[in-house]
Image: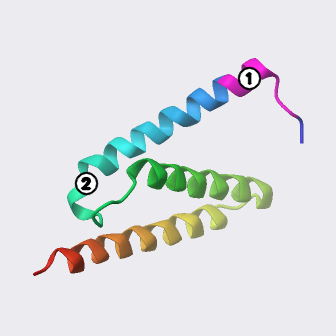
Amino acid sequence: MHEPDPPVRELLAINFDGWVDAVKGCLDAAQDRLPPGTDTRALGQFILTVMEGGVMQSRTHRSLEAFDASVAGLRDYLNRLQADATSTSKP
């Protein structure tokens, strides 16, 4: 794979960091629905990784199936996190 030029790589990093920050902001707003101690920045990076991985696979296979499967897996994971938060907050 071609290594992008340093200025291109820097712009890509800024773009991805902005996306992670935006997702982190959403997760911070929903912190009460996540397990205590959830690292929302790390979770934001994970979410972006899943989404971008789904895009790459879909482009490779020329099908949305991989993206849809990635989103379904991510949704399941987030639902489990939310259920865990609910079960740990009960007295």
Residue 42 point in image, percent of width and height: 48, 52
Q: Does dot 2 land on a helix, a strand or a loop?
A: loop
User: For residue 9, which quarter of the picture?
Assistant: top right
Q: Residue at x 52, y 64 (%)?
A: 71
**Which residue in the protein does label 2 denote?**
30
Amino acid type of the residue tagged 2 in the rendering: Ala
Measuring from the top left, give residue 89's x and y in whole percent: 17, 74
Label 1 sits on residue: 8
Query: Which of the marked residues, 2 or 1, is nearer the chain's N terminus?
Result: 1
Relative to 60, 23 lies left or right: left
Does the magenta portion include 8? yes
* Element class at badge 1: helix
Residue under the point 22% across and 80% down: 87
Query: Is 51 or 6 nearer to us in this picture?
Result: 6
**Residue 30 image-quadrant placement:** bottom left
- Horizontal placement of 71 versus 52: left or right? left
Q: Is residue 11 toward the left or the right of residue 89 in the image?
A: right
Cα separation between marks 2 and 1: 33 Å
